[in-house]
């Protein structure tokens, strides 16, 4: 365990004895609707394709979408050792509240402390096995669950997801300041819905206005990991639960940053 992880001993929740997680990466956003869960899923698929053992903790308990994106139909099972994540088609381990509820559309109407406690249980009571990279899909904002994850889980870093709207720059700054206060490293920023590439003229169009990503990144000292386009094909793949079969996306810079963590 690194010195950074030991410094959080007052709050850190103990990992399940049947689990070994080498790298824990949080995926965060300042607001909803920017594609945070999509980016989480794309990163997980890309790292899995690279030969890494990958898992996703869906910590967005009131708006879980990871199971649908991966087309997971079954429910999580368990025994005296703990709860077992559901495996995707390519072997990515997933734990989400929707894998525990009787129905996928059953609402989670819980107060903050219960939500935070459930996320801790996802870490301490789920038998994850051997994992090279675990991605934690966090709910948007700076509420109870993100605070709990920042304080209680040994994050190696976070990736911030944003979109081109100018208002987002202010919201990104809030997420950056929270990470700084919690002493959690920021690995970089991903801009989703950055542009639309017309299949006819092949030109890129800024559907949501001119991007201010470079300005925001420079102002906050953040690395730009990717700019992802609006892609109807990707949206359809997610709706069908077939994201693992989707091939047309580029996250090389993000992958390089993540794999570089192995040397630390």
Image (cartoon, rainbow, N blue to C red):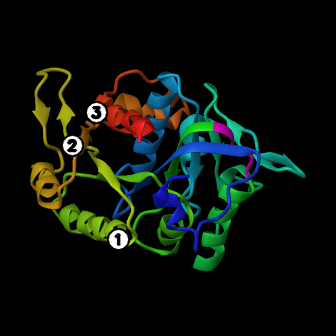
Q: Are marks 3 and 1 in contact (CB under 8 Å)?
A: no
Q: Nearer the viewer, mark 1 or mark 2?
A: 1
Q: How far across and how far down the image is residue 92, in percent? A: 61, 33
For label 2, the residue is 194
Q: How far across and how far down the image is residue 98, in percent? A: 67, 53
Q: Are marks 2 and 3 in contact (CB under 8 Å)?
A: no
Q: Which mark is residue 137?
A: none
Q: Is residue 144 magenta?
A: no
Q: Which mark is residue 178?
A: 1
For label 3, the residue is 253
How far apart are the two marked residues, 3 and 1, measured between alpha carbons? 24 Å
Provide the residue span drawn in magenta.
126-130
Q: Are marks 1 and 2 in contact (CB under 8 Å)?
A: no
- Note whether 142 is above or below 69 in the view shown: below
- Note whether 80 is above or below 260 in the view shown: below
Q: Residue furthest right?
A: 80
- For numbered disc 2, what is the local secondary structure? loop
Residue nearest the observer in this picture, 236 or 143 = 143
Residue at the image point whose x is 29% and y is 45% from the top:
192
Residue at the image point whose x is 40% and y is 43% from the top:
39
How far apart are the two marked residues, 1 and 2, measured between alpha carbons? 25 Å
Residue at the image point whose x is 49% and y is 36% from the top:
44
Q: Residues within 10 Å of mark 1 (few under 14, many from 20)?
A: some
């Amino acid at each position: 365990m690194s010195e950074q992880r030991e410094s959080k001993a007052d709050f850190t929740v103990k990992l399940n004895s049947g689990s070994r997680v080498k790298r824990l990466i949080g995926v965060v956003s300042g607001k909803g609707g920017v594609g945070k869960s999509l980016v989480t899923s794309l990163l997980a698929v890309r790292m899995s394709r690279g030969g890494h053992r990958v898992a996703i903790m869906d910590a967005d308990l009131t708006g879980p979408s990871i199971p649908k994106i991966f087309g997971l139909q079954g429910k999580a099972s368990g025994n005296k050792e703990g709860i077992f994540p559901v495996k995707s088609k390519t072997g990515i381990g997933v734990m989400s509240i929707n894998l525990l509820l009787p129905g996928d559309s059953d609402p989670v109407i819980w107060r903050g402390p219960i939500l935070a406690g459930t996320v801790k249980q996802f870490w301490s009571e789920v038998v994850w096995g051997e994992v090279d990279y675990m991605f934690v899909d966090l709910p948007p904002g700076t509420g109870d669950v993100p605070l709990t994850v920042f304080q209680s889980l040994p994050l190696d870093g976070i990736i911030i997801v944003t979109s081109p709207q100018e208002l987002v720059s202010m919201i990104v700054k809030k997420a950056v300041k929270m990470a700084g206060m919690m002493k959690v490293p920021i690995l970089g920023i991903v801009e989703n819905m950055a542009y639309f590439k017309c299949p006819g003229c092949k030109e890129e169009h800024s559907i949501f206005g001119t991007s201010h990503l470079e300005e925001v990144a420079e102002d906050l000292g953040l690395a730009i990991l990717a700019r992802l386009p609006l892609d109807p094909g990707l949206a359809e793949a997610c709706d069908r639960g077939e994201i693992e079969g989707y091939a047309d996306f580029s996250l090389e810079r993000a992958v390089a940053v993540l794999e570089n963590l192995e040397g630390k």
